[in-house]
């Protein structure tokens, strides 16, 4: 990703094209667009465009798995909360500026579950390693990344 110094320090990043479904979402159509999930979200990360299902915007914050969205929804669109919230886990792609020799650990510092660690390399710049087994998919690592190198993907 070509990123100017100004874009890096002002936080202008490219949003992920893939919207992440709400926790415990069944993946079914049936959302009537009432927006109750949006107003219930304590971190204000739920977005809903006309004709689409609600999705999480992790550039605005992280999911706390409070389940307020599921409780506010008048439709039966959510699984029981005994199941895993969603199957997505952390991935760091080749846009990560540590691969360009820049010392950055913003994703690691924001990850409460310690699903990201850094290993020192011979050039003196630590490189990221992800630990998907520790990742909850909360998205806390996404907004702090200055180059949008962090994201979530479905685990096989």
Image (cartoon, rainbow, N blue to C red):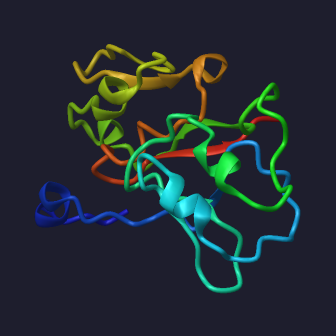
Q: Nearer the viewer, residue 141 or 41?
A: 41
Write down the quadrant of residue 67 in the picture: top right
The quarter of the image holding the N terminus is: bottom left
Residue 142 as seen in the image, left or right of residue 155: left
Q: Position of residue 4 (x, y in %)?
A: 18, 66
Q: Closest to the observer: 13 or 27?
A: 27
Left or right relative to 60: residue 132: right
Residue 136, placed above or below residue 74: above
Residue 74 seen anywhere in this rendered image of the structure: yes
Residue appearing at x 24%, y 33% in the figure: 104
Q: Position of residue 137 (x, y in %)?
A: 59, 35
For the point 43% across and 48% down, which residue is it? 149
Check the image and name the residue furthest to the bottom.
50
Name the residue nearer the viewer: 39 or 28.
39
Q: Is residue 39 left or right of residue 51?
A: left
Residue 18 spot, x, y in % from top left: 62, 63
Q: Pinpoint residue 145: horizontal percent, then vertical percent.
A: 33, 45
Q: How many marks?
A: 0
- Vertical order, 127 against 46 (above or below): above
**Quadrant that contains the C terminus:** top right
Residue depicted at x 46% and y 55%:
45
Residue at image location 76% in from the left, 35% down from the top: 155
Q: Is residue 88 rendered to the left or right of residue 134?
A: right
81 to 47, vertically: above or below = above
The answer to whether residue 18 of the structure is visible from this angle is no
């Amino acid at each position: 990703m070509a990123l100017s110094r100004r874009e890096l320090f002002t936080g202008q990043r490219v949003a992920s094209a893939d919207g992440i479904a709400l926790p415990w979402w069944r993946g079914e159509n049936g959302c009537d667009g009432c927006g109750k999930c949006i107003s219930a979200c304590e971190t204000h990360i739920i977005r809903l465009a006309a004709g689409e299902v609600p999705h999480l915007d992790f550039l605005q914050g992280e999911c706390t798995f409070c389940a307020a969205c599921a409780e506010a929804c008048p439709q039966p669109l959510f699984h029981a909360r005994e199941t895993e919230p969603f199957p997505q886990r952390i991935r760091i792609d080749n846009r990560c500026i540590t691969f360009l020799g820049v010392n950055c650990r913003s994703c690691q510092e924001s990850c409460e579950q310690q699903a990201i660690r850094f290993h020192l390399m011979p050039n003196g710049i630590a490189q990221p390693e992800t630990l998907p087994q520790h990742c909850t998919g909360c998205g806390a690592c996404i907004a702090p990344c200055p180059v949008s190198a962090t994201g979530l993907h479905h685990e096989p």
